[in-house]
Image (spheres, helix red, strand yellow):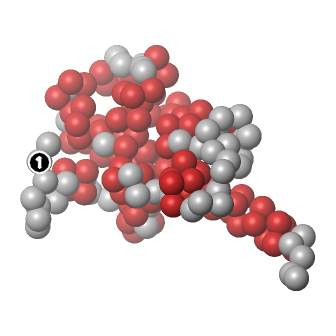
Amino acid sequence: MEFYQGKLHPLLKIKCQSARDIGRIPPKLKMLTGTYILQSHRIKMYENETDLMCFICHQGDETLEHFILECEGLSDIRNPITDEINAILKGSTNVDFHEQTSKVKMQILLDITMLRENLKLDTKLMAKIEYCSRRLLFLLHTTRYSFLSKGWKKDKKNVKVL
């Protein structure tokens, strides 16, 4: 897909379902464009950062795929919404979200417009899936931010100033 200045990405042409939905777009766009800062990105930017480990579950490197699909600490947030996406897909296209590869799951969650023709989705179904994915990614983002903020404040109290 080619992008041109002044032309909207097809993802942004999907109508928001509520005023609250508008606030959910920025974190999703950062994840889609690769500008969402995770541990794997921090390592590249800061020399003193050495741990790729996920701060939430401590079970793997904090990559975008781990954060969105695999982090056990976020499963209570992720599972109900991915089940909702699964129900939408299964009911209309007989596609099981949970049986897809990680790559396809990430594509569904980050940019459903790229799979529109393959999954034979109409505009209404895409809007339903997009609403769920925006909600999911925003909740994952806010939960991660809240967790890291609390952890950082706790660590900051234990630092001795020389």
Q: Residue at x 24, y 32 (%)?
A: 115
Decide which of 23, 5 is in the foreground and name it: 5
Lateral position of residue 86 relative to residue 113, left or right:
right
User: Where's the N terminus, which quadrant?
Assistant: top left
Q: Residue at x 41, y 35 (%)?
A: 106
Q: Is residue 6 above or below residue 75?
A: below
Q: Position of residue 68 (x, y in %)?
A: 53, 41
Q: Position of residue 35 (x, y in %)?
A: 41, 58
Q: What secondary structure is found at the residue carrying circle 1?
A: loop
> Is 118 displayed left or right of 140 in the figure?
left
Of 47 and 117, the residue lying toward us: 47
Quadrant of image for the C terminus: bottom right
Residue 33 relative to residue 49: left or right: left
Front residue of 32 and 21: 32
- Tell me which residue sits at (61%, 39%) in the image: 61
Amino acid, disc 1: Glu
Residue holding disc 1: 2
When asked about the image quadrant of residue 21, the answer is bottom left
